[in-house]
Each structure stands twice: as C-alpha cells, then as structure tokens.
C-alpha cells in the first residue's frame, strides 16, 4: 500500500495544500486520475471543495474528479490511480461513505495498488476507527469503524498547548482517556506540518516537528522524523 496521511491542509500565510506540495508532487508522480472525496466538507459545498483541491494541484499532471459527481462510484474507485479524502468533519465523512457503501471498495482499491492521500479527517479515515478525531459528532455514522488501512490511530492537528486558566483537558489527557477504554491501541499524535507516509511494509514520519506516540499505561514517546517504529 502507498499512503500519504497529512495532519493538516493549511498553514497560516500559505496557499491551500501549500506546505505539503513537494511531498504530494513526489507521491503523485505516476498518478493520472484522482477521485476526490469532499464529504467531510460542511461549511463548503462539495463542488467548491473539489475546485479548491483541483486548483491546489493545478501544476500536477492529474485529472481530478469529485466523487459526488460520479454515478458509478464503485467503478470510479476501482479504476482510479489515487483516492484523495479531504479534511473537515470526520463523523459526516464516515457517515456519507457508509451511506453510499463505498468504505469497502476504497479499502480494496488501496490494497490493490491505488494510492491514498488523506488530510485531517481523511487521515483519520485511514485508521482502524475514527475514535481519535478532534471533531464534534455532528451526525451519527453507522459505526466508528473506518478504512483500516493502517493498524494504529492518528490524532491530527496534535498539540499539547493549553490555554492559561482554562480547566479543560489537554489533548494528551483525552488520548489517555481513549487508551483506558482501548488499551491495545496505539496513537500517533501528529502535529500540523507533519505527515505519515506508508510504503508497503515501511512507515515514515515526515515534515517539520516531532510527533508523539501514545500507548496505554506508558509515557508518551517522541517520534522524530524518520522511520516510525510501532
């Protein structure tokens, strides 16, 4: 499998999908047809979201189609060189994928050689479940089971920053709560400006910064850029 899982799409002061351009260009080098899934978009229309991504990839030699415009979605997924899944609300994204019965077709396509790019909610969707998303459950999917392309969880936009005099839990505390109820799971806290790339049996962390690895009843481990040891 070949996966590119981005923590985020945008950095202040840069164009949409600006920071990962070099990674995307290399990853999509042999790709000609892309099916984009805009279903996480809530405050933007699917058409506008698709156009936004199309513009971000304007210098790439790819033909990008929004899956919402395609009648035979399963056929398009099976024939695509790459499936891209954008960020937004993870619950809405999964609910729509389940409604259209394309969770399994995407899983099979990627395991058969189709490349997968996901950012934020799209990165969550590559995990076994969506339980480590940061999003509000604005709608209820049939289950929390996601694509299961990787065997660990991702928490995108990860930060340990706290607001002075704010009494709410830190992100790390919330992930530790998750691990109490899901003790066999592993979570990568992926800060903005970082990504995870999967190439066959190898998994790498790339970008600027340092991710954290969380396991039940263990101190968080630093995950510098390089091979991700799970």
Image (spheres, helix red, strand yellow):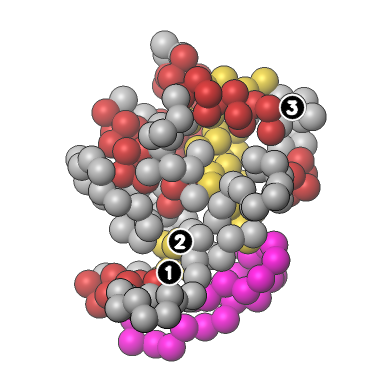
Q: Earlier in the sequence, mark 1 or mark 2?
A: 2
Q: Earlier in the sequence, mark 2 or mark 3?
A: 3
Residue range of the region highlighted in magenta in the rendering: 200-229
Q: Residue 187's spot in the image, x, y percent?
A: 43, 69
Q: Residue at x 44, y 62 (%)?
A: 155
Q: Residue 76's spot in the image, x, y percent?
A: 50, 19
Quadrant housing residue 176 = bottom left
Give the vertical position of 96 relative to 214 (above or below).
above
Q: Residue 105's spot in the image, x, y percent?
A: 40, 31
Mark carried by residue 187: 1
Does the magenta portion include 28? no
Mark carried by residue 58: 3
* Residue 190 seen anywhere in this rendered image of the structure: yes
- From the viewer's perspective, tell me whether residue 8 is left or right of residue 29: left
- From the viewer's perspective, tell me whether residue 214 is left or right of residue 146: right
Quadrant housing residue 179 = bottom left
Give the vertical position of 4 relative to 182 (above or below).
above
Quadrant housing residue 68 = top left
Q: Residue at x 32, y 38 (%)?
A: 92
- From the viewer's perspective, tell me whether residue 230 is left or right of residue 130: right
Q: Which of these two is toward me, 18 or 142?
A: 18
Mark 1 crowd level (few <14, some 14–19, many ≥20, 10 Å Cα): many
Residue corresponding to mark 2: 154
Q: Residue at x 41, y 11 (%)?
A: 71
Q: Earlier in the sequence, mark 1 or mark 3?
A: 3
């Amino acid at each position: 499998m070949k996966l590119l899982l981005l923590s985020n799409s945008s950095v202040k002061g840069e164009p949409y999908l600006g920071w990962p351009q070099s990674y995307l260009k290399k990853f999509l080098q042999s790709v000609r047809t892309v099916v984009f899934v805009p279903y996480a978009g809530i405050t933007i229309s699917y058409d506008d979201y698709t156009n936004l991504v199309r513009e971000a990839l304007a210098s790439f030699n790819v033909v990008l189609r929004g899956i919402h415009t395609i009648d035979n979605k399963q056929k398009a997924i099976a024939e695509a060189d790459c499936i891209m899944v954008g960020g937004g609300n993870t619950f809405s994204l999964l609910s729509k994928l389940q409604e259209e019965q394309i969770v399994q077709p995407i899983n099979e396509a990627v395991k058969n050689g189709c490349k997968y790019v996901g950012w934020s909610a799209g990165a969550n969707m590559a995990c076994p479940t969506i339980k480590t998303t940061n999003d509000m459950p604005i709608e209820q999917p049939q289950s929390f089971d996601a694509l299961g392309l990787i065997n660990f969880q991702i928490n995108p936009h990860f930060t340990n920053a706290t607001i002075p005099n704010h009494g709410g839990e830190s992100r790390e505390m919330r992930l530790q709560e998750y691990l109490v109820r899901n003790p066999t799971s592993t979570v990568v806290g992926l800060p903005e400006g970082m990504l995870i790339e999967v190439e066959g049996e190898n998994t790498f962390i790339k970008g600027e910064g340092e991710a954290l690895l969380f396991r039940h009843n263990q101190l968080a481990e630093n995950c510098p850029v390089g091979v991700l040891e799970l």
